[in-house]
Image (cartoon, grey):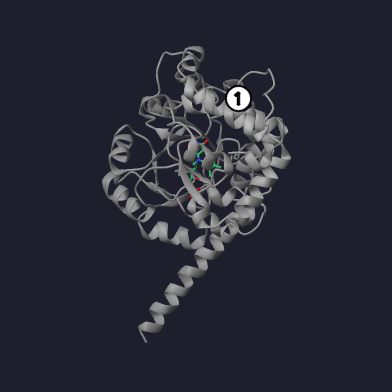
Amino acid sequence: MLGIEYPIILAGMGVTAGPTLAAAVSNAGGLGVMGVLNLEPEEIREWIRRIKTLTDKPFGVNTVLPMGMPAGINAETLRAMIPQEVKAFAEKLAAEWGVPAASEGPPGLELTDDVRRKQLEVILEERVPVLASGMGDPSEYVNEAHARGMKVVAVCGNVKQARRIAEGGTDIIVAQGYDGGGHTGKIGTMALIPQVVDAVRPTPVVAAGGIGDGRGLVAALALGAVGVWMGTAFCATHEAAADTIDMARISPEEIDFWKQKLVEASDSDVILTRVITGKPMHVVRNKFVETWEKEGPACLFMPLQSMAIDELTRGIREARMTELTCATLSGQAVGLVKEITPAEEVLNNALDGAATVMEDMFQRTVNAGG
Ligand SMILES: Cc1cc2nc3c(=O)[nH]c(=O)nc-3n(C[C@H](O)[C@H](O)[C@H](O)COP(=O)(O)O)c2cc1C
């Protein structure tokens, strides 16, 4: 359906999965999906044009369509809704940690309803091979995407969502279990996948959340999935975040620090927090998140929470205070990430690992049969 060789999809990851990483995965026979949620609509167009220069294989573009986002409210009105208590806490942290004021430049992209609609328009106009929605229900865009020859993939975290999205005509459902990196639902991967497979049949299901190597790939296939959507496993690759560094959005030091942190982290270093976006998200524990969780005010809804911490996080980033960065998104499979490698190696290792597991199982069956 996707025109790819191997059933491995690079998960869409804002900041991390740009044209360079996505093209590396597509060129290696998987499907590279770019994460564009933090980009202005015209920057998305540039990334789409750039990836076309790096690969002639299919690729995808992922943004989010979160539910419960306030519609028809502009960024200024939203900003005025940030409670004084929250602003005061961010200022207190800045003073305690010695974070300088962020530059006068524009705030980070404010993901209002209007912005995400414009993002979607560009993705549709550019007729990318695959539109991948990371959160929410893409049903209202399915007909238009199909008319433009595009496939639609959507991530969901429970059976009810999966059923609704499949009924809306989405081509492939990605069922992501709790274990996954970034935003995540409440149901564990092992329990979720077969239930979604049964609920949406004949729509194909791709498994996500905690799949870090060939063993996870075989397990996903055993649970009835047709492939895997892997995020964390591709985060400590040479290509990860390369394009965001090129755009001077993030420093090479911060990215190197983060990749190293992933290599060193183990399963229990991953914590769930609403501090970054207002929705539950898995990150590697870090001072920013832990301090806010322990001492800070209740988190706001999306996108208000990220707007409330924007000034502080930009100040941290501009001052290159990497120890304080909160951009350490990761899933529970992070303990399987052992070194920083080319993306192609992650994909090939998963395929080789899967082949070994299946040969072993076959051998054991033959031996048991005498
Ligand atoms: C660093 C990072 C950034 C992410 N950014 C996004 C994003 O921008 N949009 C989105 O829909 N999902 C995002 N996710 C979630 C992934 O698309 C994917 O669902 C998840 O990583 C799968 O679980 P795994 O990390 O255990 O492989 C992100 C995940 C990580 C680790």
| Figure disc tally | 1
Where on the picture, by quarter, is residue 320? top right
Residue at mark 1: C-beta within 8 A of ligand 1: no
Q: Position of residue 215 (x, y in %)?
A: 48, 63
The residue positioned 32% from the left and 40% from the top of the image is 162
In front here: 9 or 267? 267
Q: Where is residue 118 in the image (x, y as percent from the top left)?
A: 51, 19
Q: Say if residue 39 shows up in the picture.
A: no
Q: Where is residue 1 in the image (x, y as percent from the top left)?
A: 44, 43
The residue positioned 33% from the left and 35% from the top of the image is 165
The residue positioned 43% from the left and 74% from the top of the image is 362
**Amino acid type shown at disc 1:** Glu
Q: Say if residue 282 shows up in the picture.
A: yes
- Label 1: how many residues lie within 10 Å, few (<14), some (14-19) or many (20+)? many
Where on the picture, by quarter, is residue 316? top right
In front here: 315 or 213? 315
Residue at image mark 1: 311
* Left or right position of 36 against 297: right
> Eyeballing the image, is 23 above or below 96?
below
Q: Quadrant of the C terminus?
A: bottom left
> Eyeballing the image, is 251 above or below 302?
below
Q: Where is residue 40 in the image (x, y as percent from the top left)?
A: 59, 22
Question: Secondary structure beneath disc 1?
Answer: helix
> Eyeballing the image, is 205 above or below 352?
above
- Name the residue furthest bottom: 370
In front here: 311 or 3? 311
